């Protein structure tokens, strides 16, 4: 094995593919190196909570044989992890619920099948919060995942195990999901890249709460997408996993995403937003975004700090909170649903707090949902008009960098410290998922800085409907101009 150890730990997919093609390393050697690193370091991080090393070794041997025959596939021989809820035949799927501990799906999720067809070596699953409900990643089955930058802090949620695995050097790719920032927040907390695709772009078959059968469907708000350590890897993997389900829309439709709007930074028209009308942004995040805006401006991009074309973020956030809990409501037990409906019934019509809007969402009847969806369609139209003036929006992924673990219950009673002032935890965390989640827009998370204490800071780049290539292209340009992923100092490869 002659490949550089730093590349084996933290190399991009493209770098590792080049090493595999040049026979500097075999797929089996790359896998053995990755497994050894997991076994040495994951005891204190706890990111890879379901391990499939024996079958991975078989897949790596098959990849070596294919490489020896001269075959070239997008991910041939590349070790990959998956967020726990993705069905993998022969591995448990629990969503963190103890009563699903013994559920074993019979077939792979469609995304998993596409990864395997592209030559990926699946090595295991990453940790999550129970029911994917939190911005931390812990549950009674698998325990707590710690942030590799600071073990006392959250790696984010609900794809926190994936973010931690990437930062720790446990493979160059992990597949996450996002309904409320669950790709974007872990990317921000762990200093990696993540892409929340446009709604409906990547099929969800095989990503469903047990014991539901793996049927095709789009769902509402929720998407699945790639997390990696370079923006170019996001583009590569999106090409592998995107496209309509062959058993549903794929019967008659094919994917043809538009090319990026621009190839050069000085052609982009960017609106930079660092505040929200309903929630403060912490100084560390706000000042980092300000410095990024200044660098973009000096690089020739056309940067604005305000626009009369921007849809009302307060109204959008309230709409999102209702839609979010409406989308999550099938997970409620009948008793919990009745309790939620009781809470909503006694709310004053004048109560427009985010907590009240979430309460209304839990028990929404279809008639009310249709009215809310009609409001969303109007909002989507306003964003479409906005993106005639701008190419992208740079927006916080969260109000603060990674925060200390807080497993206190009840969840709704938690508070988050933003510059010394406490705010409702759910409001302070969920609010940044809007507007990309509400309107189904693509959003790419990119690391931009670190705090004086060393914690990563990232942003999300929100783009026009179905223009995923534009947000990823801008992320690539920012990475190229201003730097991207840096390994946590305590885990950097020895030279």
Image: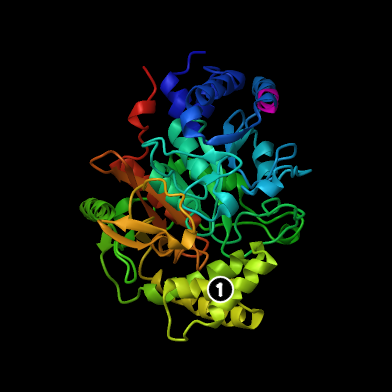
Residue 463 seen in the figure? no
- Image location of residue 7, percent across then percent down: 44, 24
Q: Tell whether 280 sits left or right of 246.
A: left
Residue denoted by label 1: 361
User: Which picture quadrant has residue 363?
Assistant: bottom right
Disc 1 secondary structure class: helix
Q: Residue furthest front?
A: 409
Question: Label 1 neighbourhood size at 10 Å, few (<14), some (14-19), many (20+)?
Answer: many
Task: Judge from the rendering whether residue 229 lies leftward or rightward of residue 211; answer left or right.
Answer: left
Q: Nearer the viewer, residue 451 or 466?
A: 451
Looking at the image, is 104 positioned above or below residue 392? Answer: above
**Foreground residue among 43 and 163:** 43
Residue sitting at 42 percent across and 42 percent down? 192
Question: Which image quadrant: the C terminus?
Answer: top left
Residue shown at the point (73%, 43%) measured from the top left: 108
The coloring applied to the image is rainbow
Return the residue found at the far top: 1
**The magenta stretch spans residue 397:** no
What is the x, y in percent for residue 399?
34, 57
Magenta-colored span: 55-59
In terms of image quadrants, where is residue 151?
top left
Say if the magenta span includes residue 56.
yes
Residue 282 is at least partly visible in this image: yes
Residue 407: x and y in percent read 46, 49
Closer to the camera in the image, 139 or 70? 139
Rendered location of residue 383, percent (x, y): 44, 72
Question: Height in image: 127 above or below 213?
Answer: above
Q: How many marks?
A: 1
Q: What predominant SS class does the magenta segment belong to? A: helix
């Amino acid at each position: 094995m002659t490949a550089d150890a730093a590349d084996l730990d933290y190399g991009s997919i493209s770098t590792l593919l080049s090493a595999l093609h040049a026979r500097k390393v075999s797929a089996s050697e790359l896998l053995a190196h990755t497994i050894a690193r997991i076994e040495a370091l994951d005891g204190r991080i706890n990111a890879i909570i379901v391990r499939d090393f024996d079958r991975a070794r078989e897949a790596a041997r098959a990849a070596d044989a294919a490489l020896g025959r001269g075959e070239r596939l997008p991910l041939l021989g590349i070790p990959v992890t998956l967020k726990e809820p993705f069905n993998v035949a022969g591995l448990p799927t629990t969503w963190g619920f103890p009563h699903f501990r013994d559920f074993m799906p019979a077939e792979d999720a469609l995304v998993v099948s596409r990864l395997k067809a592209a030559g990926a070596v699946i090595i295991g699953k990453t940790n999550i919060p129970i029911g994917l409900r939190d911005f931390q990643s812990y549950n009674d089955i698998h325990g707590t995942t710690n942030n590799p930058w600071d073990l006392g802090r959250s790696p984010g949620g609900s794809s926190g195990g994936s973010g931690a695995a990437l930062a720790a050097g446990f493979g160059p790719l992990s597949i996450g999901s996002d309904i409320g920032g669950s790709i974007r927040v872990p990317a921000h907390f762990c200093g990696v890249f993540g892409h929340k695709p446009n709604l409906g772009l990547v099929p969800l078959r095989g990503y469903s709460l047990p014991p539901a059968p793996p049927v095709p469907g789009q769902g509402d708000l929720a998407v699945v997408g790639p997390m990696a350590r370079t923006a170019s890897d996001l583009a590569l993997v999106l090409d592998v996993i995107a496209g309509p389900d062959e058993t549903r829309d794929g019967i008659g439709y094919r994917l043809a995403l538009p090319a990026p709007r621009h190839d050069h930074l000085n052609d982009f028209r960017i609106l930079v937003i660092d505040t929200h009308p309903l929630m403060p942004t912490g100084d560390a995040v706000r000042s980092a975004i300000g410095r990024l805006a200044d660098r973009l401006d000096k690089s020739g991009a056309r940067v604005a700090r305000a626009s009369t074309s921007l849809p009302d973020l307060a109204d959008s956030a309230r709409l999102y909170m209702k839609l979010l809990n409406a989308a999550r409501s099938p997970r409620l037990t009948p008793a919990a649903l009745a309790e939620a409906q009781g809470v909503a019934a006694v709310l004053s019509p004048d109560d427009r707090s985010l907590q009240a809007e979430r309460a209304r969402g839990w028990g929404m009847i279809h008639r009310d949902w249709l009215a809310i969806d009609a409001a969303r369609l109007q909002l989507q139209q306003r964003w479409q008009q906005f993106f005639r003036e701008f190419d992208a929006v740079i927006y916080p992924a969260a109000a603060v960098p990674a925060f200390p673990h807080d497993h206190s219950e009840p969840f709704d009673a938690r508070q988050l410290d933003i510059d010394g002032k406490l705010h409702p935890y759910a409001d302070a965390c969920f609010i940044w998922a809007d507007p990309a989640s509400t309107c189904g827009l693509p959003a790419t998370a990119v690391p931009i800085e670190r705090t004086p204490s060393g914690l990563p800071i990232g942003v999300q780049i929100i783009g026009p409907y179905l223009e995923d290539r534009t947000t990823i292209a801008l992320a690539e340009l920012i990475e190229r101009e201003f730097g991207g992923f840096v390994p946590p100092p305590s885990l950097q490869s020895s030279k």
